[in-house]
Image: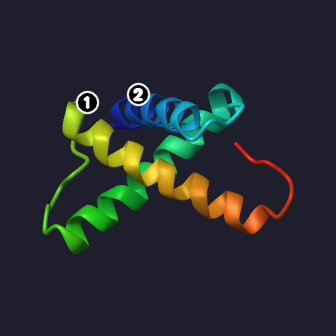
Amino acid sequence: MGILAWIVVGLIAGWLASRVMKGRGSGLVGDLVLGVVGALLGGLLASTLLKMPDAVNGINVTSILVAFIGAMIVIAILRAFSGRRRLF
């Protein structure tokens, strides 16, 4: 998947995840980073647990869904380790 596709999928997934997880958002760059990390984590989990090779493979609904789920997991982990401060 090209870098532009990673950016678009990451931006969409990060923005959606920050809204669903009732966060304040983290701005354009924060949502992008969150979405790309979520895409990596979601792709790893999808290929390992669900035997879906290339789960994140372009700008499509499946890629956005996998990245979105991964981004929600990343937000939950960050919140668990952040203590009292509210991240994302």
Task: Looking at this view, name the residue that lies furthest to the right.
Answer: 84
Q: Amino acid at mark 1?
A: Ile
Task: Tell which circle, 2 or 1, labels the residue nearer the N-terminal end.
Answer: 2
Seen at 49% across and 49% down, the residue is 72
Amino acid at dot 2: Val
Question: Image quadrant of residue 51?
Answer: bottom left
- In this image, 9 relative to 61: left or right? right
Name the side, left or right, on which 39 lies relative to 62.
right
Image position, residue 27 (x, y; %): 69, 27
From this view, report whether residue 33 is shown above or below residue 44: above
Image vertical order of residue 67 relative to residue 29, above or below? below
Can you give x and y, in whole percent of width and height, for residue 41 in the image? 41, 61
Q: Residues within 10 Å of mark 1 (few under 14, many from 20)?
A: some
Q: Quadrant of the C terminus?
A: top right
Residue 73 sits above or below residue 35 on the image: below
Viewer can see residue 41: yes
Q: Position of residue 80 (x, y in %)?
A: 69, 65
Looking at the image, the residue that sits furthest to the bottom is 48
Tell me the element at label 2: helix
> Which residue matches tag 2?
8
Residue to which mark 1 is pinned: 59
**Rendered residue at 65%/32% (across/down):** 29
Is residue 1 visible from the viewing direction of this image?
Answer: no
Vertical placement of 87 versus 27: above or below? below
- The residue at 58%/43% (across/down) is 33
Query: Are the residues at dot 2 and dot 1 in contact (C-beta closer than 8 Å)?
Result: yes
Between 53 and 42, the one lying in front of the other is 42
- Horizontal arrangement in the rendering, residue 54 relative to residue 26 (left or right): left
